Amino acid sequence: MADILIIDDHDSMREGLEIHLRRRGHRTHAASGGRAGLDLLQESPMDLVITDLKMAKVDGMQVLREVKQAAPETEVLVITGYGTIETAVEAMKLGAADFITKPFSSEEFGVKVDRLVADRAEKAALRKENLALRVENAQLKEEGTGQVRYGEIVGESAAMQEVFRWIERVARSDSTVMVYGESGTGKELVARAVHAGSRRRDRPFVRVNCGALAEGLLDSELFGHEKGAFTGAERKRRGRFELADSGTLFLDEIATITHATQVRLLRVLQERELERVGGEETIPVDVRIVAATNTPAEELLEGEFREDLFYRLHVVPIQLPPLRSRIDDVPLLVSHFLEKLRARTGSPVREVGASALDALMSYDWPGNVRELENAVERALVLADCEILQADDLPPLGENGRAVPMPQSRTPAPGDTFPDGGMDLNRAMEGLEERLLRQALDQAGGVKAEAARLLGLKPSALYYKLEKYGIEA
């Protein structure tokens, strides 16, 4: 449900639009002219303003200018008659979210309104999240040098202090950033910190997991599509580039995109414009790119990744260290996760004891910071004490080190169980791990293809890869 202001000097048109939008569950407000509409907007904030372009005295263009000046977060939909398309395009340049040409069907009108309302809600959520990050970063800067947190990134080791310095330097510019690091090291957190420290901080931060979508779906997700562009494209849809316009677009798992998508992405980066899938209209975009991958730079260049696209992305590289190379940060991270997760889990734990910290610091953390956070959360959920000890931790392997899964085989007829029986769960996990590795090898490391081969959803595949510490 949204608050929508309709401005039109034709009574029948205005009343008809009101009735239709109320049936769709929206709250409507109406004005019979541009000045009356602007006065109403000063009294009550609106999510969306729908204005006719041609009106006496104060026309739709003036309404648009004053709305975007007084309430830039309010979306504007312009209604235009046939023959005034050029004026409608000019309105888009001035900040209109979309336009609709008379005559139009009630269904076409309703779909446009619903999409604009949904887009505004998404942008509002992103602005709220970015504001929280900005406030936190400002507080950290006030604490002086040698900070141990940058947004949600935690670390006091020399390696992490260097990461903080790089974020601080690059955030002030509009340069493209490439974040390298193993799975679970916090690449998205770096992207969010870069955005929060930039001049685009009040604009959208939009994330795309390139490895979670098949080629056709990824193109539609990135660049949008026109109605009828492919089976199931029942309406026009703006892509993530358009949603991130004037903000930051985070392209996670960039190494997984196909050659065809690489070509389209390269064009957008070079020309700062795009065409939706199935469309011919050229749409300008102003987006700052932060990309991330767990593939080292030299392997990207040796593989099938386009060299020209690589150098477009690899303008400012930031390398995140694995947790095993900054193990002294574990106590600080554990304290951070304890504070973050205690309320969510309802745990009585108030402190992590020395034996628990010793165990956590002796493990090599193949899943990096994400694995550590998961381990702390599981311990908080299961523990019924105030001081967490080593016995309260989930299993971390023999002597606190990662233990490789045992090799298993299908039992042959006549086989007998070894002394002590057989651990069926461990045997099945060993088989599952081998199948995961085999599928990744067969798919050339492309996770979406590996998920298809295994008959899994991409999200399920990612969970299992993280579970076994498999990197792709």
Image: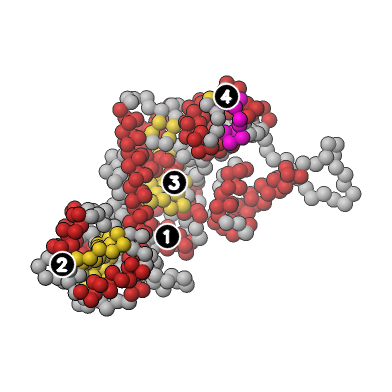
Q: Crowding at label 4, few (<14), some or many (≥20) Cα neighbours within 10 Å?
A: some
Q: Do tag 4 and tag 2 residues touch (Cβ < 8 Å)?
A: no
Quarter of the image where one finds residue 6: bottom left
Between label 3 and label 2, give the one nearer the viewer.
Answer: 2
- The residue tagged 3 is 292
Q: Which residue is drawn at 58% across and 47% down?
A: 463
Res 325 visible: no
Frontmost residue, 381 versus 242? 381
Q: How far apart are marks 3 and 2 (CA)?
A: 50 Å
Q: Do tag 1 and tag 2 residues touch (Cβ < 8 Å)?
A: no
Frontmost residue, 304 versus 64? 64
- The residue tagged 1 is 221
Q: Crowding at label 1, few (<14), some or many (≥20) Cα neighbours within 10 Å?
A: many
Between label 1 and label 4, give the one nearer the viewer.
Answer: 4
Percent x, y of residue 61: 16, 64
Label 2 secondary element: loop
Label 1 secondary element: helix
Residue 401 to residue 472: above or below: above
Q: Residue furthest left?
A: 57
Q: Do tag 3 and tag 2 residues touch (Cβ < 8 Å)?
A: no
- The residue tagged 4 is 387
Quarter of the image where one finds residue 407: top right
Residue 33's tag is: 2
Q: In this view, does 419 lie to the left or right of 145?
A: right
Q: Distance between the residues labelled 4 and 2?
A: 67 Å
